[in-house]
Image: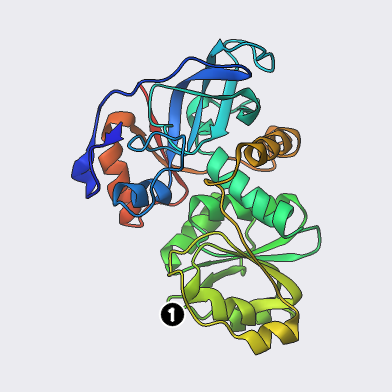
Amino acid sequence: MRYRAAGGAEVIEAGEVEVREPGPGEVSVEIAAAGLNRADVLQRKGFYPAPAGAPPDVPGLELSGRVVARGPGATLWPEGAAVMAIVGGGAMARRITLHERELIPVPAGIDLVAAAAIPEVFLTAWDALVGQAGLRAGQTALIHTAASGVGTAAIQLARALGARPIATSRKDAKLAAVHALGLGLGADDGVACPESTFAPRVAQLTGGRGADVVLDTVGAAYFEENVRAVAPKGTIVLIGTLGGGTGKAPITMMLGKRVTVIGTVMRARALEEKIALARGAAAELVPLFERGLVRPVIDRVYPMAELAAAHARMEADDNVGKLVLAWA
């Protein structure tokens, strides 16, 4: 699948792309399925170009599939191995070539289509909560956009770590849907915030302390309220700008609370960083799936040819969990 130009869903079409043979330390993967992310929608609109080295017109930031060819010196995976990965683009094609150490094993008991719902959201949430913020047992994590792919992943990861998740959504129906999924969100730990006001409720839920970690996918619209909601010496991790990229910062309050603010991205990271994240996920994250502590949350699976319909559902903000595109 490709975008023939920047624009609406009408620019999505089937096409062809040349995929190179694997070089030293690389493998080729026959793709079974790919997850849809908001970055794919932004790229289609012309707001988020692919990084250097990724196909400029083929979307897809995460994939699952099987290894079908190995380059010189590639020994980590046998042909036929079930794998998943985060990539800079090109996941919504039949095949892709990448470094073998970027790949992560598909957890035992999870099929290839469901595995496509794992890499982007779980690695993003894992890296932000654990790698960046150091979330640990006994702490509280405030997680925005509860029904999103990252939100549903972060709620589960916080609970698996022994932390308490508190999650927000602008829609009561979405909070109810998240509760119904049984992801470990407490009965009173969902906060509806249609007017971006959630700090009083977080304070109430935490005995006035606030959240030790705030995982924010919204950005500017929530930043001041995040500072109000975070605990003294707490950490705010910014991973998205759904609510804008520029806003006010309550600096006096930040100084008084000694707040740490971390901004992070995944797509533009150097190969070495992506490899380190993948290897860490293989060792620490995959076992959580195999122990049944976390699971992919899929809203809907579409045939790859219906990518435009998946974009429409994401833009309507109707999904709870991941949208997945699968090859027949």
Q: Position of residue 119 (x, y in %)?
A: 56, 39
Q: Position of residue 257 (x, y in %)?
A: 74, 82
Task: Determine whether 284 is above or below 237 in the image.
Answer: above
Is any part of residue 208 visible from this angle? no
Which quarter of the rendering shows the C terminus? Answer: top left
From this viewpoint, is residue 316 visible? yes
Tell me what residue is drawn at x 42 percent, y 67 percent.
Answer: 171
Query: In this picture, is 141 found above or below 198?
Result: above
Q: Does residue 259 appear left or right of residue 196 in this picture?
A: right
Q: Nearer the viewer, residue 149 or 280?
A: 280
Q: Position of residue 323 (x, y in %)?
A: 41, 42
> Residue at coordinates 71% horizontally, 56% vertically from top-left?
132
Give the labeled residue for mark 1: 195
Left or right of 14? Residue 116 is: right
Q: Name, please, the residue furthest toward the bottom.
A: 252
Camera-side residue: 277 or 57?
57
311 on left or right of 19? left
| Disc 1 packing (10 Å; few <14; some 14–19; many ≥20) | few
Looking at the rendering, which quadrant does residue 278 occupy?
top right
Q: Is residue 203 above or below residue 105?
A: below
Inspect the image, locate mark 1, and give the three-letter code of the amino acid beneath it.
Answer: Glu
Helix, strand or loop status at disc 1: loop
